[in-house]
């Protein structure tokens, strides 16, 4: 993967409540480098 990464946090409504989704994408290849989901928006979501 290349060296420029883009990240974003969004929230999604589910039957069990809201969840937060953090995704990291490579800007050059536009592939998802990683993602994490949690029921709370804390710093552990992006670690």
Image (tube, rainbow, N blue to C red):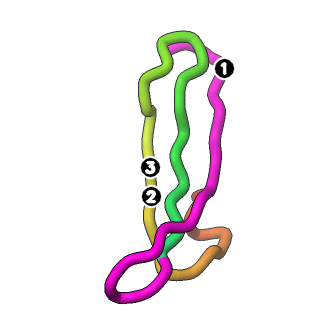
Mark 1 vs 2, N-terminal side? 1
Q: How many marks?
A: 3
For the point 54% across and 23% down, which residue is it?
26
Magenta-highlighted residues: 1-18
Q: Quadrant of the C terminus?
A: bottom right
Judging depth in this view, the residue of 31 and 4 nearest the camera is: 31
Is residue 43 left or right of 12 when viewed as pictured? right
Residue 10 highlighted magenta (yes or no):
yes
Q: Which residue is mark 2?
A: 36
Q: Which residue is mark 3?
A: 35
Say above or below: 47 vs 25: below
Main SS of the magenta part reads strand
Q: Label 2 near label 1: C-beta < 8 Å?
A: no
Element under disc 2: strand
Q: Mark 3 or 1 closer to N-term?
A: 1
Q: Badges 3 and 2: C-beta atoms under 8 Å apart?
A: yes
Structural distance between the alpha carbons of marks 1 and 2: 19 Å
Q: Residue at x 63, y 41 (%)?
A: 7
The answer to whether residue 8 is above or below residue 26 is below
Residue on which disc 1 sits: 4
> Which secondary structure lies at badge 1?
loop
Q: Give the CA separation, mark 3 to mark 1.
A: 16 Å
């Amino acid at each position: 993967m290349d060296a420029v990464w883009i990240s974003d946090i969004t929230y999604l409504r589910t039957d069990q409540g809201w969840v937060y989704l953090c995704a990291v994408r490579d800007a050059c290849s536009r592939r998802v480098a990683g993602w994490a989901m949690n029921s709370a928006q804390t710093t552990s979501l992006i670690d």
